[in-house]
Image (cartoon, rainbow, N blue to C red):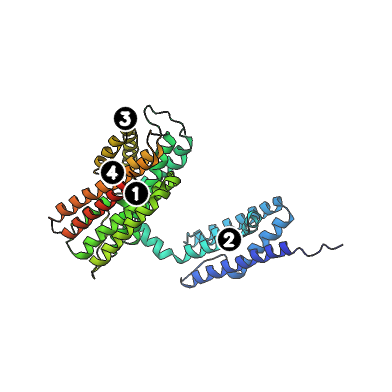
Amino acid sequence: MYEILNITLLIKFLVVVIFGFLTGLELREYYAQKEDVFSVGTTRTFTFIAMLGFVLHLMNFQIYMLGLFVLSIFLSIFYIHKLKIGKKGILTILISLITYSFSGIEERSIYYIPLIYVSIVFILSSKPKIKELTQKINNEELVTLSKFLLLSVVILPILPDKNVIPYVSVSPFKIWLAVVVVSSISYTSYILQKYFLPRTGIMVTGILGGIYSSTATTVVLAKKGATNLVQGSIIVATGIMYLRLLVIVAIFNFSLSKSLVLPFSSLFLVSLIIFYFLRENSENVKSNVDSNPLELQVAFIFAGLFIVMAVITKVVIFHFGNTGLQVLSAIVGFTDIDPFILSLIQGKYAVTQSDIIQAILIAAASNNVLKALYAGVFSKWQMKKAVLNLLFLAVLTLGWAVYFH
């Protein structure tokens, strides 16, 4: 008796064969732009490779692996011959093995095959851009990123999630998690500025700089001249700071972030309105990015500041209560406010949620005062509009702090 046609199996076969065909077609288009190509095959060859993998996998897994072994031997012979004629590329070999594995991937999830195909197309078509990017990337930054990923992926999971540091009500795991999250947000902006948008308009510099560090961006832009657009972009960077803080708070304390949505969103909108009235046409300028925010020294300093701020906050609240916390918030605003805010929202202190929200707003307000000072000093007090508007945002932020009192 013949088995009734299995529709599900038929669909899987068609998916494997179709994407094998498309992979070969894409490779043929890729090689069509080159001269003197030495390839194992293109459209029909890759279709048959995908079909072979499906048929052998359908028989049993051992035969499927044997087929992979035989295919690897054939491809090795092909590559040896390729080396003899002075060619070294293994692109065709890699894609052949990937195409053969379509049937094995299909057993896990049929949706991964289109995803892999799209990835192949993207990588093949992006060769000029990838080559350009790799030439720009600093090797030291790659080493730094590798070290940071090692500390994040390997070290983070083994850190204790218990309060083991004296006078610190936050576990080592949560401390380092805060470092990873904040550094990752800053690093994304840094990469966009330095490698993908190196010559963008002043406004884009303000937006990306606000994600990276609104204080550093204020210093950079204050040196570029007191045009309305530059001053408006400083305000945009500060507006983005509010959204950045909102995201960070939401990651670690979502219930607290819901109370900050209205004040931070309104302050962001006010920043956009100010920019709207200050904007003017301007030529593109080169974004100015100082240092890699993933440098290990910076990460360890951040972690150290986190612990120090957690201890100081606990001592101040214990001895001076909410009043001491608000004064501390105003002082912290003239430094890096991220460690203070993260230690505040993750720690367990004898204060109410409203007190914590008020402290965050006061720190943001005093940080705006610091940026107003920087804008004035580094522009030799020519950026009067930026200074006044930063002070205006500081007053509005303090107004929200009073509202939560």
Mark yes or no: residue 324 visible: yes
What residue is pinned by disc 4? 336
Q: Nearer the viewer, mark 4 or mark 1?
A: 4
- The residues tagged by marks 4 and 1 sit, at their Cα atoms, a distance apart of 23 Å
> Going from the N terminus, do you reach mark 2 or mark 3 first?
2
Q: Nearer the viewer, residue 21 or 265?
A: 265
Q: Secondary structure at mark 4?
A: loop
Q: Amino acid at mark 1?
A: Glu
| Quadrant of the rendering where the C terminus is positioned | top left
Instruction: Describe residue 330's horizontal placement relative to residue 180 as left or right.
Output: left
Q: Residues within 10 Å of mark 4 (few under 14, many from 20)?
A: some
Say which amino acid is labelled 3. Val
Name the quarter where the N terminus is drawn: bottom right
Residue 351 placement: quadrant: top left
What element does badge 3 sit on? helix
User: Which residue is painted at 71% across and 60% down in the image?
Assistant: 55
| Coordinates of residue 132 in the picture (x, y in percent) | 36, 62
Residue at 36% across, 56% down:
265
The amino acid type, in three-letter code, at marker 4 is Asp
Using the numbered discs, state the Cα–Cα distance from disc 4 to disc 3 in whole angstroms: 19 Å
Q: Identify the residue under disc 2.
A: 96
Which residue ends up furthest to the top in the rendered image?
166
User: Mark 1 = which residue?
Assistant: 141
Q: CA distance from mark 3 to mark 1?
A: 38 Å
Gap between marks 2 and 4, in whole Å? 52 Å
Quarter of the rendering containing residue 189: bottom left
> Label 1 near label 2: C-beta < 8 Å?
no
- Relative to 58, does residue 362 appear above or below in the rendering? above
For label 3, the residue is 315
* Mark earlier in primary sequence (2, 4): 2
